[in-house]
């Protein structure tokens, strides 16, 4: 009933310059014209250099190139809601006490062409 699923995975990787090994990155999947960011990991020694923001922007460009409606993701209160909000994401859902004492946030960014 919903039409084609259009599943397509994406990985934007961080490679260690010395070894060439993958040390982090962004993993996502496109379904029903939305990109879902499943995981974003930046190694501690690379943090504070805007690498996370570059990974997210790269995934957004990938999604725009496939005419996606937008991007969505989830994160925890103790992780990165403010980081994603600084990139233009808005909270559209909150699950309190997941885990107990914290919360899980669901954020989205709708592309202007789709609004």
Image (cartoon, rainbow, N blue to C red):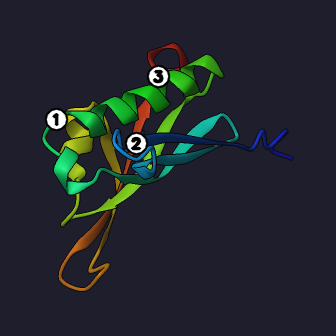
Q: Is residue 79 above or below residue 92?
A: below
- The answer to whether residue 84 is left or right of residue 31 is left
- Give the residue furthest to the front: 18
Closer to the chain start, of discs 3 and 2, is 2
- Mark 1, residue position: 49
Q: CA distance from mark 3 to mark 1?
A: 25 Å
User: In percent of the image, x 29 and y 81: which residue is there?
Assistant: 99
- Horizontal side of 27 relative to 93 (left or right) equals right
**Pointer 2: residues within 10 angstroms few (<14), some, or many (20+)?**
many
Q: Position of residue 43 (x, y in %)?
A: 27, 54
Q: Which residue is mark 2?
A: 14
10 Å crowding of disc 1: few (<14), some (14-19), many (20+): few
**Residue drawn at the location 20% of the way across and 33% of the way down:** 50
* Residue at (55, 20) in percent of width and height: 64
Residue projecting furthest to the top: 113
Q: At 26% across and 32% down in the image, what residue appears?
A: 87
In depth, the one of 88 and 49 nearer the eye is 49
Mark sitting earlier along the chain (2/1): 2
Q: Residue 17 appears in which quarter of the rendering?
A: top left
Q: Which residue is mark 3?
A: 111
Secondary structure under tag 1 reads loop
Residue 73 has which mark? Answer: none
Q: CA distance from mark 3 to mark 2?
A: 25 Å
Mark 3 vs mark 1: in front? 1
Front: mark 3 or 2 = 2
- Vertical relation: 3 (above or below) 23: above
């Amino acid at each position: 009933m919903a039409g084609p699923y259009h599943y397509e995975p994406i990985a934007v990787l961080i490679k260690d310059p010395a070894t060439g090994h993958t040390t982090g990155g962004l993993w996502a999947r496109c379904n029903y014209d939305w990109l879902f960011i499943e995981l974003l990991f930046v190694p501690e020694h690379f943090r504070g250099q805007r690498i996370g923001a570059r990974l997210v922007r790269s995934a957004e460009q990938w999604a725009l190139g496939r005419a996606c409606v937008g991007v969505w993701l989830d994160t925890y209160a103790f992780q990165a809601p403010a980081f994603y909000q600084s990139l233009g994401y808005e909270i559209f859902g909150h699950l309190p006490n997941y885990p107990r004492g914290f919360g899980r946030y669901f954020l989205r960014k709708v592309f202007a062409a789709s609004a």
